[in-house]
Image (spheres, rainbow, N blue to C red):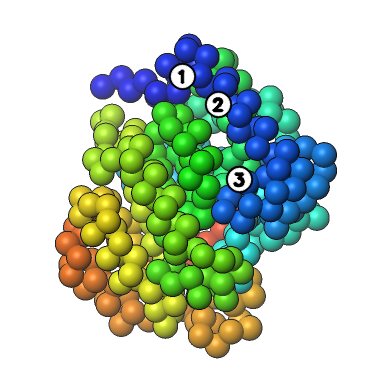
Amino acid sequence: MNFIPSYIELLYSGELYRRAENAYNNLLSCASCPRNCNVNRINGEYGICTSGHLPIVSSYTPHFGEEPVLSGTKGAGNIFFGNCNLKCIYCQNFEISQNQKSEKHREVTHNRLAEIMIELQNKNCHNIGLVSPTHFSATILKSIYIAAQNGLAIPIIYNTNGYDSVEMLKLYDGVVDIYLPDFKYGNSEYAKKYSLVDNYFEKTKEAIKEMFRQVGDELVYDGDVVVRGLIIRHLILPNDLSETEKVFKFIAEELNQKVHISLMSQYYPANKAYKDILIDRALRNSEYDKALRLLDKYGLHNGWIQEMESAESYRPNFNEDRLNPFKN
């Protein structure tokens, strides 16, 4: 199978250019995510994400720690964007997501981001993984357009925390080949406490429904690597602060039991987690086993499960090595 990303057709029709312009204009009164800060980022105003109109690239590398069907044998071409629209107190990537002053100097032009995409393609990566793209979603499309003009022709992964604007996602319809949202909470109260965000559960359900509408429940493969589809990640938190059952119930009853789930056991108390007794510890085997039982309860049998003993291999160190933070 020789997969041709659908954004190529949008490029030739002129629609990709129109989408990129429409998205960028959103920054005049930013509504890139459900926070709707309505600041003019083009003129230098900052909202919650403290980001301007140019993307911040904190790191980019072939990455082999994604789901096997995304990393393949040559790696996912991951681009890690700095800053974030969430403020998770346990974020494992806090060195780049919550360190605005140090990341500011890593702003790149749209042309440079396009060059990075081409570089990763030239390294034979299977795809381009946009990691934490939400707060730059209004500006990334410009770079995708430029990269496509210059030969980009591999699938694009939208690897997000799930707190996305439905209207912005619609501009990515036919541009993104693989959606990879992390559905963090089945309870907006916990999301408010631990990620400092309002209405997470409700807004993320709306966003994932839109992703599902675009790509459906089937995964399309080219050999052993997925080139189109939806994979929903879920990180198990201590003391069931993720309210896993509500997340699985939504997927099974409002999407489809065929949807692929990536259940993650890699939680560890990073960043400011030590300040809260409920999350200042690693996951317990009993909590992991409960999540496995819930997968069975809701008939969610497609996907991948992280083994408890593998958790440490997923811990990055962006301060030590920006070129290889995961020690591939």
Residue drawn where x is 23% and y is 59% of the image: 253
Q: Are marks 2 and 3 in contact (CB under 8 Å)?
A: no
Q: Are marks 2 and 1 in contact (CB under 8 Å)?
A: yes
Q: Identify whether 47 is placed above or below 184.
A: above
Amino acid under disc 1: Leu
Tell me the residue that label 1 is attached to.
10
Tell me which label, 2 or 3, sits earlier in the chain: 2
In this rendering, position of residue 133 left or right of residue 222: right
- The Cα–Cα distance between marks 2 and 1, rounded to whole angstroms, is 9 Å
Q: Which of 217 and 292 lies nearest the eye of the viewer?
A: 217
Q: Position of residue 159 (x, y in %)?
A: 48, 47
Element type at mark 1? helix
- The Cα–Cα distance between marks 2 and 3, rounded to whole angstroms, is 14 Å
Q: Are marks 3 and 1 in contact (CB under 8 Å)?
A: no
| Quadrant in which the N terminus is drawn | top left
Q: Identify whether 210 is placed above or below 113.
A: below
The tag on residue 32 is: 3
- Residue 266, quarter of picture: bottom left
Callout count: 3
Q: Position of residue 238 (x, y in %)?
A: 43, 79
